[in-house]
Every structure is written in C-alpha cells, then in structure tokens.
Amino acid sequence: MAFHPLEHRGIPLDRQVRNWRELDVTPIDPDTADPYTRCRIITMNGIEVEAIMFSHHLARHCPDPEVKQQLAATRYIEAQQQKAVNWLLPGVSSVLETTIAYEQVAVDLTSWVARMEPDPYLRQAYEFGVLEDFDHLYRYANLYEMIEHRKAEAIVDHLTEVMPGRPTPQHHRDPVDNVREPYDRTSLDPLSKLHALTILSAEQQTMNFYLNTGPTYMEPIARQLYQEIGLIEEEHVTHYESLVDPGETWWEQLVNHEYNECYLYHSFMELESDAKVRAIWELHLNMELEHLRIAADLMRRHDGREAAEVVAPELPNTLTFEPNKAYLRGLLATQEDLTTLGTGYVREAHERFARMQEQLHAGERPPSDRVLAQHQDMAGRDYRVQTEGPHPVDGSHSGN
C-alpha cells in the first residue's frame, strides 16, 4: 500500500525528547547480525548527520530568531536520533572492521541507487563513483588481513564481493574535474532528488569518518592508506554535491531532507530483520513525519509554496540493500578505464589528470599500491577470495 508522508501526523515534537535510559540502545551483535542491518545503521547515521549539519547551516543564514528556535528544537531531536542510531554499532568492532562495513554500504547502496536512477546523467555519476568505492573495499581488506589477520568476508558475509575495482591511484584527479552538472529541480523526477541526497550524505559521513579515525592507527601503512582514501572521499563529496541544483531554496532543501528521512526510515522498517532495530526505525519514522510537517509549514510561510510542489505525493519503492555482484562485474567490464574531464567522462588520460598524478605521487608508489605489495610480502599471494558456489542472483537478499 502506498505511503503518503505528507498526509500523516507524527509524534508531537514536545513528546519526542528521550531520557538516558531510552537512548541507551542495545548494540547489534557483529557475529550474528545481518550485515545489511549494520549497513542500514551506517546509512541512517550519515543521513542524520547531514540533517543536523544542514540545519546548522540554515540557522547561520537565517535572521529570524523564531525560525532559529524552531530549527534548534527539531535539530535536538535529530541529534538524539543520530546518537541512538550510531550507538547501535558494537563497541567490540575495530575501526577497520567498521571501515569495511562503511565501504560495503558505499558499494551496495550506490549500486542499488544507480540501478534505480531514472536520469541517465545521474546514473552515470553513481556508476562512476561506485567502482572507486569497490576498490577501496578491496584495499582495506588487504590492510585488515595484514593488521588483524582476518578476512573481510567475515564482515560482508559474501554478500558483497571483495575484489579490485578501478585502481585507487587513478582516483586522484584535478579538483576541477570532480564537479558535475547539476540536475534541474523543475523537471527532475522526485526520486532522483532522494537518490542524490542519500548518496551525498553517505559519502560525506565516510569522508568525515576517515579524516578523524585515520591518525588513530600506529601502523604507518594504515595511517597512509586512510589519508589517501580520505582525500578521494573528499573528491566524491564534491562529485555528488555538485549534482544538486543550487537553485533549490533553503526551505525546499529542508523539506527534501525531512522527506528523505521519512523515505529511508520507512524503507528500512519494512526490511529490517532485527526486531529491536526495526522498532527504532519505526519510532524515528513517526518522529520524522512531524519534522516533515514542520518543514512544510516553514516552506509555506517563508517560500510561499507547498511541500507537495517539490516532493513526490507518495514514497517510492523501498530502498533495498541486496547483492549487486553481476551488476558490478558488468560495470567493471565496461567502465573501469573511465576518468573525468570537465563535467563529463573520458577513457583517455588527459593533461590535467597526468599533471595531478605527477604532483601527488611524485614518482613514488601511493599507499593504496604499497598496501597490496606489503600484503603480498606477508601472505605470499594476492588477496583473492572466490565466492563459494554460484553467485547469488542480484536482488536475492533483502535483509529479511
């Protein structure tokens, strides 16, 4: 049955504050939890962080004290939601294990969005980016076996393949070539706006995670690999944020953020296999419905428009975490050698690309290549894991 978020009233805002006992959520068990439950947790943490930071930026540009107070009231609840969501991750997992889970999110979330994206230009942007996240997963898997002597497959549970993508050293481009053409908000399918905001939020949280956790390692190769891939994540955020139409007003963006949260909490509630986690998704959905109502009212008062003019009347199909093995192998076969030039894509290295490679690498092997060499020296083999048996058909696992 179709769900129409603009037609629902959620929990009143003054009843949404939780006490410490309510915020003390039980983390998932990394040994028994569905890996896609962890992926949903990581995704929603990124979505909540983006919502919080957007609200802060809006408040800094808003002269109206009453609006600032309204934003602060909603933002505090978003901050509580972020704590409840992120604290579902288990403290027993190492930073590197969480990193591999982050990359699994990037691979399977971006693949699903690319498969479902109706706009060809946006679809190409997601296809381009996912082949780089795919290789990041592979590089971190090498580091994981070197440092912790365990296989990344224990984390991704063979749902996501761990194999080379577009080689990480080739991800370093002149910054001007990371900027894409924005979509046209007046003609774009509303689903595409949700896709763009979702992937931007996920990549942004990965960038933030790496820039803060990278220097916590003692091993030089780990510190260096996080530094390199962290720089690439900055490129990815530039890549994805430039897709958003800069003509969207603050109020339109606020509505899009709240609507997207409703979409994702509703999707994950439908698919979640862990009853305790599903209860959190349901609670947060009912909170977000009220946040959306408040955002729609602010848009009506300050933008003179109705929220229904900029978002879909009903939620689109459920956003699903599922294997994308055949899809990714197809992309590797056809797009591995792509790079960017201006706002488009080319197959040949060009002058700006070559200059950036020379300046950054300076004739030395980058950390992403050295981690492979060190793994080879340690293990006497390449990091390759063949999935046992036939590959699951894409879409066969939905987290249920």
Image (spheres, rainbow, N blue to C red):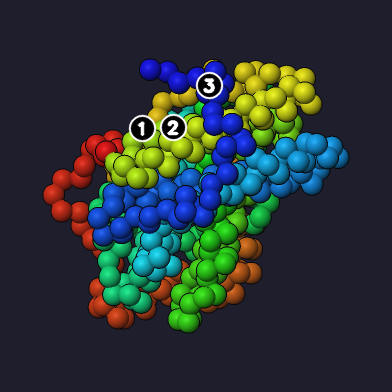
Residue at horizontal 30%, vertical 63%?
A: 152
The span from disc 2 to disc 1 (Cα, nearest Å) is: 6 Å
Kindly identify which numbered label has been placed on residue 266.
Answer: 2
Amino acid type at circle 1 is Glu
Mark seen at residue 270:
1
Left or right of residue 198: residue 271: left
- Please report the residue visible at 77 percent of the width from the left and 23 percent of the height from the top: 301
Please say whether residue 146 is visible from this viewpoint.
Answer: yes
Q: State which mark lies toward you, 3 or 1.
A: 3
Circles 2 and 1 in contact, beta carbons < 8 Å: yes
Label 2, label 3: how far apart the Cα atoms are: 13 Å
Q: Quadrant of the C terminus?
A: top left
Q: Give me the residue at 66% from left, 29% from top.
A: 294
Q: What residue sits right under mark 3 in the picture?
A: 8
Type of amino acid under label 2: His
Of residues 63 and 233, the one nearer the viewer is 63
Nearest the eye: 18 or 70: 18
Sequence-wise, the earlier of marks 3 and 1 is 3
